[in-house]
Image (cartoon, grey):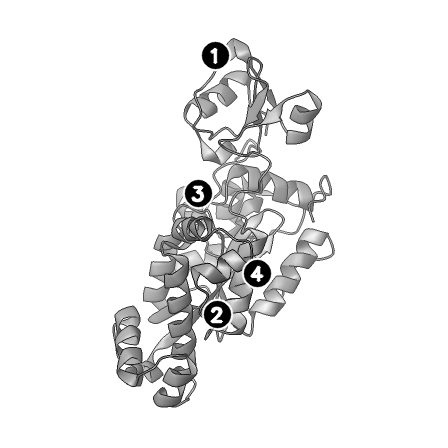
Amino acid sequence: MNLSFNQKYAAILAKDETFDEVFYTCVKTTGIFCRPSCTARKPKPENVEFFDDSKTAILKGYRPCKVCKPLEKKGETPREIQSLILELNSDPSLKLKDFHLRERGLDPARIRRWFLKNHGITFHAYQRMNKINNAFKKISNGEKVTEVAFDSGFDSLSGFSDSFKKVFGFSPSESKNAGIIDLTRIETPLGTMIACGVKDGICLLEFSDRKMLETELKDLAKRLNSTIVQGENPHFPKLRQELAEYFGGSRKEFSIPLLTPGTDFQVQVWQELQNIKFGQTRSYKAQAVALGNAEAVRAVARANGMNRIAIVIPCHRVVGSDGQLTGYAGGLWRKQRLLELESGQLRIA
């Protein structure tokens, strides 16, 4: 992406997150380099220089900012929290209290802040939710309510029923007829992604810092008349494998089954996106022409932006008519990295 000095300076004044990792701001007077979205006080133009990568900034003698932490991948789940989540997924009946965390050398307050920021609930609430979600799936698969309640660590059936109804809005006995959407986190070289799956396939794959993610999840649950629960799905191992192969440079096409509920027009747009080959790009105009309606450029762009399955349905391969990168829900810097990966200019795995 070729940006002028003035465009870059305007981006840092606006604290525009879409330019994070597209370039870095280096402040001559402090010797610090930052992300464009950094909330620290902005320097005067004459005291700024910009670099396209953090390596160059470091080689020029700049130090990473302690406020925006430009060397950390945005949205990435810390390794110790990944370990906690995996442990709870493998045994939802576990109950890890603060003193258990301290025994592992972890700060309970830090763990709590991370879960509040990324899930909107505390770590202890996450554990309870994970336990109830697992119980929901067991009951939906035909296991007896009483057995599930006590296997989940509840001391009484009434306590289990109250907790269950508080989360889902209906009793355990009513859950056998409810649909389930499984949700998990997947780590990638470009940050954490949230994946959702049902029996028919993957229905959502988005970067965890996407601003409209919560809205997308609510819309998906409504469209499928289902409840989203954290847990594994038969399609998740294949998705993880194919993403790893893609980022490693050995996969150019995905074979994972997909479910893409939407209007007829949206589905047509998403299907056409999958016809753009690895290593190629196409303009919104060309997309409209390919769909047989050259005047539907704006409608195509809107449908493109509504794509819920990033990377696998490659909306990142659509660019402006002048070849410039346009909006991308995962951030323009990710769009640039994905296109560089596919063109052979970059190895990121």
Nearer to us: label 4 or label 1:
4
Q: Is residue 329 above or below residue 261?
A: above
Q: Residue at x 43, y 21 (%)?
A: 41
Query: Which amino acid type corresponds to the residue marked 1 in the rendered image?
Result: Lys
SS at badge 3:
helix
Query: Which amino acid type corresponds to the residue marked 3 in the rendered image?
Result: Val
Q: Earlier in the sequence, mark 2 or mark 3?
A: 2
Which residue position is annotated with label 2? 231
Q: Is residue 197 above or below residue 284?
A: below
- Quadrant the N terminus occupies: top right
Q: CA distance from mark 4 to mark 3?
A: 45 Å
178 left or right, relative to 207? left
- Residue nearest the viewer, comparing 330 with 29: 29
Which residue position is annotated with label 4? 83
Say few, some or many: other residues with alpha carbon within 10 Å of mark 4 (under 14 / 14 to 19 / 20 or more): few
Q: Residue at x 40, y 89 (%)?
A: 147
SS at badge 2:
loop
Which residue position is annotated with label 1? 44
Which residue position is annotated with label 3? 297
Would you identify the image quadrant in which residue 121 lies? bottom left
Q: CA distance from mark 2 to mark 3?
A: 39 Å
Q: Position of residue 314 (x, y in %)?
A: 56, 51
Query: Which amino acid type corresponds to the residue marked 4 in the rendered image?
Result: Ser
- Residue nearest the viewer, comparing 320 with 143: 143
